Image (tube, rainbow, N blue to C red):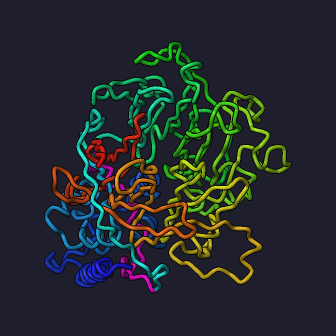
Amino acid sequence: MTKNYLVKRALAVIFFGGLLSFSFSCQNPEKTIGSDISTAQDQILKGKELFSTQCSTCHNFKENGIGPNLSGLTRQLPSDWIRGFIQSPAAYFEKEDPRALALLAEYKAPMPAFAELTEEDLNALLSYMHTFSTPAGELLAAENTNWIPEGIEDSGIRLAIREVFQLPPSDSLAPLAKMTKMEPIPGTQRLMINDQRVGIYEVVNQKASLFLDLKSQRPDLVSKPGWGTGVGSFAFHPDYLQNGKFYTAHTEPGGTAQADVGYTDSLQVFMQWVLTEWTNENPSTSVFAGNSRELIRVDIPSQAHGMQELAFHPYAKKGEEDFGLLYVGFGDGGTVEKGFANIAQTEGAGLYSAIWRIDPLGNNSSNGQYGIPESNPFAGVEGKAGEVYAFGFRNPNRLFWTDSGDFYATDIGQHTIEEINRVEPGQFYGWPIREGTFAINPYGSFRQLFPLPENDEQFGVTYPLIQLEHDELAAIYAGYQMPYGPLQGKVIFGDILSGRLFFADLKEEKPRVKSFELLLNGQELTLAELVGKGNRVDLKFGRDAKDHIYIMSKTEGKVYEIIKQ
């Protein structure tokens, strides 16, 4: 655990605890904090609905999670402070508000702004929050256990980058463009990139031209709330030049259409993830013109951990088993956080918390819209989901292969551990009873980890190749195996929120993780410095047909190339 982090954490506790203790004593002492909040039942109900759709993925009233426990907050802070922070956290960071800085130090990334919420919406939210009266105490309580004491060493390597282009802004507020992926169409020089709010662009002469207006094709597309909703991923079939087929994953509101995969009626359906096949009549056209069909639709109870990745094995050759098989990374959808860990913990019997492998051109699935390869580990096994290739992932947000043909997945942890897993067919990767190489109670506090039990082998868990604690990064995302430069052969990855960058040689039995920095116009800087104080980086990576590697930030919608050295 780094010394700098411990200092930050201590300061956060001091700031937060101190502010709680005097509760803004500069306010009128005769005015009780929270006395201005309405207790009208209709307003509370409206606030409850808003909280469920806008806030519940990160916050609750029982314990700290992605964001702090909010119980009792309206009795500790003036309403104006809470309203203002919800609408524009960045404004509080800019004026160096102590509480805002304490939150930033503890959670490592700012809360997104909710500037679209009206005064009426904010008042309703406060009314609902005010129904939770038990003070949370010191919301930024320090952790008692340092689970991974070794810190990450700075390699001293500095990679030069240059700004290449910016996606057209799809919003006036950050993130200006919500890209998650940039890769070439197989067998071509054509470079494609998505914006989760819009669809797929083609990059021509360092400018983005709209290829697929998915929002127009699917008017029910939603990309709010959350940074992971909308057009989550895309993948072009390796035979695209012959068959014109490519695939997208996107979100629609719960109940938009009958789902192929669902769960108990006692759990809300908040969104649906939809996997779509598109067939371009002329594969060489610069604007999609053709038809589409839905392959599968899956219910989830939140805006989180859905169909984050679509990928074809990039090194598979025609005639080989993996050629043309589509891999899908699907998380738990927030089911565990909602108290329904059984939906994720299915031992390969369900499609949540799993990596799927399907034949998009087949038709032997239960809905007849795609195929299940006979070589899949659970194909034809009674009580199992034939689509599942591996399972036990909270949020397998990035699937990738190295040139050796080895298959990997990054998995974003709940509260403490981030993972890179070497994926093998049929294996169980631990969620929701493990986070990294530690035990977790999926029906208890997610903040509590435990040593592995003595009988751990009976659970059949395959543990991560790399695990890192949240004092180093908050949400892992992998890039690519570097084909050039001082990191040639190494896999680069980073922290989505802060943009901190790392690398490792995954061929090693116990890969050593080190960090690296960037040079822009000869100046050394971090991605957090690049996007500006108080902003979330939302790091992503890209690759073109010439194997140039790119770094991307949703906050600015900008794309930077790692220059060959």
Q: Position of residue 286 (x, y in %)?
A: 40, 18
Which quadrant would the N terminus be assigned to in this image?
bottom left
- In this rendered view, identify the residue nearer to me: 205 or 439: 205
Q: Vertical placement of 31 versus 317: above or below?
A: below
Report which quarter residue 297 is drawn in. top right
Q: Is residue 260 left or right of residue 73?
A: right
Q: Residue at image x 16%, y 68%?
A: 96
Q: Position of residue 188 (x, y in %)?
A: 46, 26
Q: Position of residue 136 (x, y in %)?
A: 40, 77
Report which quarter residue 561 is drawn in. top left
Q: Residue at image x 54%, y 47%?
A: 403
- In this rendered view, identify the residue nearer to me: 166 or 351: 166
- Please, what is the dominant secondary structure of the magenta stretch? loop
Q: Position of residue 57 (x, y in %)?
A: 46, 57
Farthest right residue in view: 382
Residue 35 within the segment the image draws in magenta: no
Residue 133 within the segment the image draws in magenta: yes
Q: Is residue 110 left or right of residue 359?
A: left
Q: Is residue 520 left or right of residue 312?
A: left
Q: Vertical placement of 149 versus 302: above or below?
A: below
Whether residue 389 appears in this view of the structure is: yes
Q: Residue at image x 38%, y 36%?
A: 195
- In this rendered view, identify the residue nearer to me: 93 or 278: 278
Q: Residue at image x 74%, y 59%?
A: 347
Q: Is residue 444 left or right of residue 208?
A: right
Report which quarter residue 502 is drawn in. bottom left
Whether residue 84 appears in this view of the structure is: no
Figure disc tally:
0
Query: Which stretch appears magenta?
Result: 116-144
